[in-house]
């Protein structure tokens, strides 16, 4: 029996049966059976069904947001924004089935065209930090391209995925096209990775498990996309709007209690502006309201579990240089205060490892080259920001930072219409935007000869004709 907790109270909110490998096999079999029909649904009808699903999600968005907050502890306003993105994502990809265009390539003796075809059954494995949002980034393009799917949510946060399956069924998505299986990663997740009838696995989670997924997928040469960890840099030059950079830096790392793969968890500040930056940042950290997710004034909720809180706390030993510390409630719930460690070097453990909690390392740099060197001195390459008023410098640095997404004078990372994904050990492939569709389709090349019996393309035949 799986006990699902509310991290803000530590109380059990739901008890569920835990799926096994056999349940995963059964879901894969249902998805396999549904695939031939779903892939041949007329593109315009597939669009209509996805639009209907988007509307159904829209109609239930408040329920879904409440459920997400109850299960993750994130502030209700954040959950509402996330579910809004789920709806937008389905609307966006609802337009895709009729736009899965191929090419027509000039060749000798015929016509050459390419088709974009669905892969088959896709296995989707998602984490607990943005449960339905990250699932929607995978489900919407997968379905639009004509694939059927098996979704495995994280065991800590399965509630909105279960609701999603019901909403999809009620919206008329055919039986077997969407299948949700709630069970442990090492059983259900691994089964999706190994099963010969699964054509592709799209995984979001830790880099450690991502490596296992890649390894497991090799046995059947499965396609994989991986969205993994990060240790993104927020690079602040002395010529930046320091007030704006400092006022927004806390939200860029403490949002979702720091449990965000795009968290700017290293703030690199030019040495001459270092002290000013910290002073400007202090009120923004101290004023963060940490507490009840259902209080509209709350900025930050608890961590996902007691075990995770222990891991986060290990990055702040007794002798850690805590420069700024916010507040957190006492008592039940997995609370941890926003914590700023400064000055740190890029060699310190808190600057090298993904903490996935509200702890940030602030590190000084000398000049542009040093900033880029330090920003790139990590195994990760997911996100990041550059703050400067010098446009040429902004573009120079943007080119040289090894990261999949980057913002200039902003801390945003994700938009429905733009590609998202990592370089280096932050992952493989891209989600969102038109790019995601490439990862849920296979290109088939078809050559059609236009030669008749009387028309051979052989050069010697042509020369005989001409003789
Ligand atoms: P995990 O890697 O522990 O788990 C992610 C998912 O994988 C869960 O559903 C988990 O199942 C499942 N899983 C665990 N073991 C296996 C296995 N052997 N085979 C297949 N599936 C498995 O990550 P967390 O859930 O702890 O999420 C946090 C991590 O996710 C962070 O490192 C973060 O950076 C990353 N992340 C990356 C994002 C990105 O887009 N790049 C976005 C969000 C998070 P279960 O837990 O139910 O057992």
Image: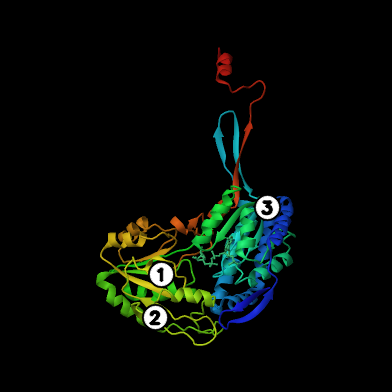
For residue 105, above or below residue 399: above
Measure how far apart labels 3 and 1 are at the Cα level.
43 Å
Horizontal and vertical percent position of residue 81: 55, 73
How far is disc 1 from disc 2 in space, using C-alphas?
Answer: 16 Å
Is ligand 1 closer than 8 angstroms to the Cβ of mark 3?
no
Rendering quarter of residue 3: bottom right
Q: Which residue is mark 3?
A: 43
Q: Secondary structure at mark 1?
A: loop
Q: Position of 413 compared to 266: left or right? A: right
Residue 434 appearing in the image: no
Q: Nearer the viewer, mark 3 or mark 2?
A: 2
As drawn, the label of residue 239 is: none
Q: CA distance from mark 3 to mark 2?
A: 49 Å
At a point 35% along the width and 60% down the height, the residue shown is 377
User: Looking at the image, how many numbered discs can be counted on the residues?
Assistant: 3
Q: Is residue 171 above or below residue 450?
A: below
Helix, strand or loop status at disc 2: helix
Q: Is residue 10 visible?
A: yes
Ligand 1 is found in which quarter of the picture?
A: bottom right
Left or right of 325, for residue 454: right
Label whose residue precedes the other's in the sequence (3 or 2) = 3
Label 1 sits on residue: 265
């Amino acid at each position: 029996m799986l006990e699902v907790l509310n991290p803000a109270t530590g109380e059990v909110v739901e008890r569920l049966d835990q799926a096994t490998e056999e349940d995963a096999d059964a879901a894969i079999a249902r998805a396999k059976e549904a695939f031939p029909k779903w892939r041949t649904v007329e593109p315009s009808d597939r669009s209509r069904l996805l639009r209907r699903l988007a509307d159904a999600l829209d109609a239930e968005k408040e329920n879904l947001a409440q459920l997400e907050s109850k299960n993750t502890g994130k502030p209700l306003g954040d959950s509402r924004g996330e579910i809004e993105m789920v709806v937008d994502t389905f609307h966006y990809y609802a337009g895709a089935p009729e736009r899965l265009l191929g090419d027509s390539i000039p060749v000798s003796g015929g016509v050459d065209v390419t088709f974009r075809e669905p892969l088959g059954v896709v296995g989707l494995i998602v984490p607990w930090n943005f449960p339905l949002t990250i699932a929607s980034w995978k489900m919407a393009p997968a379905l639009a391209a004509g694939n059927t799917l098996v979704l495995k949510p994280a065991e800590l946060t399965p509630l909105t995925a279960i609701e999603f399956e019901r909403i999809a069924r009620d919206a008329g998505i055919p039986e077997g096209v969407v299948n949700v299986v709630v069970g442990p990663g090492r059983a259900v997740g691994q089964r999706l990775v190994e099963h010969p009838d699964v054509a592709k696995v799209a995984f979001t989670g830790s880099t450690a498990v991502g490596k296992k997924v890649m390894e497991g997928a090799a046995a059947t040469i499965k396609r994989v996309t991986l969205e993994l960890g990060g240790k993104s840099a927020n690079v602040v030059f002395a010529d930046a709007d320091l007030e704006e950079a400092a006022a927004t830096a806390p939200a860029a790392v403490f949002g979702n209690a720091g449990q965000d793969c795009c968290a700017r968890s290293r703030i690199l500040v030019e040495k001459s502006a270092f002290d000013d930056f910290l002073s400007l940042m202090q009120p923004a950290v101290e004023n963060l309201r940490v507490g009840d997710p259902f209080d509209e004034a709350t900025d930050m909720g608890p961590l996902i579990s007691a075990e995770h809180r222990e891991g986060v706390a290990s990055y702040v030993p007794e002798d850690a240089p805590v420069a700024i510390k916010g507040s957190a409630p006492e008592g039940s719930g997995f609370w941890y205060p926003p914590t700023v460690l400064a000055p740190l070097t890029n060699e310190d453990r808190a600057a090298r490892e993904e903490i996935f909690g509200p702890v940030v390392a602030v590190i000084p740099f000398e000049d542009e080259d040093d900033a880029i060197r330090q920003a790139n001195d990590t195994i990760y390459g997911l996100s990041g920001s550059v703050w400067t008023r010098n446009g040429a410098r902004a573009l120079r640095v943007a080119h040289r930072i090894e990261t999949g997404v980057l913002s200039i004078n902003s801390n945003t990372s994700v938009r429905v219409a733009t590609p998202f994904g990592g370089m280096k050990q932050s992952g493989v492939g891209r989600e969102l935007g038109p790019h995601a569709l490439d990862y849920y389709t296979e290109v088939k090349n078809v050559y059609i000869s236009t030669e008749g019996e009387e028309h051979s393309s052989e050069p010697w035949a042509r020369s005989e004709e001409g003789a």
